[in-house]
Image: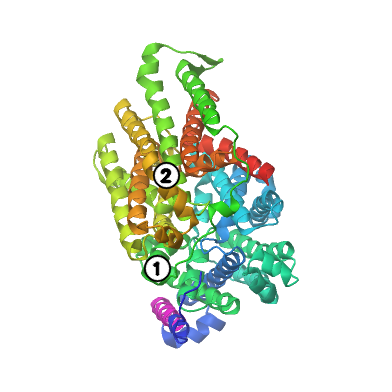
Amino acid sequence: MTAPFRRPPILLPLAIAGFAVAALLLVRTNLAALVPPALWPDALLAPAPADTMQVLAHYAFLPRVSVALLSGGGLALAGAMLQYVLRNPLAEPATLGISAGAQLALTLATLQAPWAFAIGREGVALLGAALAFCLVLVLSAARGLSPVSVTLAGLIVSLFCGMAAAVVTLFNHDLLIGLFLWGAGYLDQGDWQTTRSLVGQVLPLALLTLLLIRPITLLGLDDRAARGLGLNVAWFRLAAMGAAVALTAVIVAAVGIISFIGLAAPAIARLAGARRPVAQLVAAPVIGALLLLITDQLVLLLPTTYRAFPTGAMTAILGAPLLLILLPRLAAAEPPALRRHAPVHRAARPWRLVALIAGLTLIIFAGALLTTGDATGPVAGHWDEILAYRLPRALAAFAGGLSLAIAGTILQRMTGNPLAAPEVLGISSGAMLGIIAVMFLAASPTRPLQIAGGAAGAVLMLALILALTRRQAFSGLRLLLAGIAMGSITGLVVAVLKTFQDPRLGQLLAWLSGSTYATSMPEALLALGLGLAALALTPLMLRWLHLLPLGGRFARTLGMSVARVNAGLLLLVALLSASATILVGPLAFVGIMGPHFARLAGLVRPAEQLVGAALFGGLTLLAADWAGRVVIFPYQIPAGLLAALIGGPVLLLLIGRRA
């Protein structure tokens, strides 16, 4: 996470000064548009009741500035703590599922338990965030709250909560517009109440963080070394993560979900030269506060329709390019290797187990073809319906799950990171942006035109990410950061679209959730052929997949051209991810579940894990598509959402039992 050479000492102050100057200029411009400079003291201290512009400046603009500073600083501080304690530069507040837990709690309370708002919206959000965090702790406690186990459990909990909220949203979109506005991170203010609340909560938590600097510094070492110095690793890691969770929950409850600040601000601070914990915990909040303020002030410079662009999501527009510009200067760092954390257990007869999984897949496939649903439950169907409707859907679901699981397995072994999945490359995000552009810009967005737009978006995103990481031999850390940066822009687009009342939004939400209803037979066969072709290439990839988890330096000593191998594997991953995304939406969760299911079953060597993960991924999505059609007939649950709702808890249970 730190650079191999010392940055100039003046670089960090210059970076902070640059952000500060930009923020002050923007604040001055926007304030001058409301009140002449000569009246600023009056507007700040005692606005004239008869002067509307002074009242707006005092009760709307200035509280908005203070809320942006407090929220940005708190989220950046939480992100810096998580990244240092977990020794993972990809960690951020969302990693522990806090934001997703809060959003799910608010969604359920709005629709099913409005009486819960007696404790206030903040109370409901905090309750959801706390429950999600407690679930992460329970799942990772057996491993002593180790960085990899906490991050993995947090990611799965976050994805599960997000998918559960999406299921509810799909059927109740019109009733949740207010929640979408909150979730997008609008910073509109009408008084100083939110500012006072944040001051009374964020500042004490920040002071508590300063008291934890010494143990946090030791937590940056290896766990064994920290214990040797007398540190209770589990308890102090719990305290540091608890402070970060509290900071995030307080801010999310007050202003909604603010994206990217917790990831970008600490990364920029490190890249500017902040290496020690004290420097990071001081510089990151300052940069985060200024970054969010700059973003919000740029939003205010837009025309009066700026409310369509939420500040919380717009941070990606400013933060992603900054991170991408600084990305080439990021030191080469090896993420936690799979071999250090993979289960010791290996199946005694792995290929017999693979054969059993294949047999189970055939049974589920037959069930998906031969049954449907009506008012009385599952009943046998007819051959014309099977060939016209069920067969394309079943093939598409299986092909999508198979392709994403293969892509996830390759990514995890290539980067040595058990958290890697197809969506971190940005390929699914690129395909999503291409299809969204076609749906909202084309006069007649036909299915072939949508597929063409998705393919073009996926290829362009891949080309951009490869160009950004080519000079560093496509290192795993830089690749993941670049993918997250590009994916955050997609999050902005989706967050903005959710606040609209466009009639095309229903179709878009159905596709985003992983529905297979619009898939044709040629499309399904093409995706299936691509996935099977990737499996056929397994013998050619075995040596690469054996050596890459050991680290790029070790692979080079054995004569491997790491840059060329990574480029070839990335191209294959891109093709697999794009084909699955175009057909059944961005079902990234299957890309995480498949490889982990295979490892937990004892399939740990490259060949058996790749085949086993492919079967697990296809089986998961096939079963989800089948169940989604018949469980609540005539209503349907998209395969992607149901796969996350069912597969997520199963994966969490298996990980907990393995621990």
Type of amino acid under label 1: Leu
Q: Position of residue 306 (x, y in %)?
A: 39, 62
In the depicted structure, whether residue 356 falls above or below residue 501: above
Residue at 31% x, 58% y is 464
Residue at 41% x, 67% y is 323
In the image, 45: left or right of 123?
left
Confirm whether the magenta stretch covers residue 26: yes
Q: Position of residue 199 (x, y in %)?
A: 64, 73
Q: Position of residue 277 (x, y in %)?
A: 59, 76
In the image, 567: left or right of 296?
left
Q: In terms of secondary structure, where does tag 1 sit?
A: helix
In the depicted structure, whether residue 11 falls above or below residue 106: below
Reading the image, the residue beneath label 1 is 327
Type of amino acid under label 2: Leu
Q: Which residues are magenta?
A: 16-35
Q: Quadrant of residue 237?
A: bottom right
In the depicted structure, whether residue 488 falls above or below residue 219: above
Q: In terms of secondary structure, where does tag 2 sit?
A: helix
In the image, 125: left or right of 283?
right
Q: Earlier in the sequence, mark 2 or mark 1?
A: 1
> Alpha-carbon neighbours of circle 1 within 10 Å: few (<14), some, or many (≥20)?
many
Which residue is more in the foreground, 609 or 640?
Answer: 609
Reading the image, the residue beneath label 2 is 542
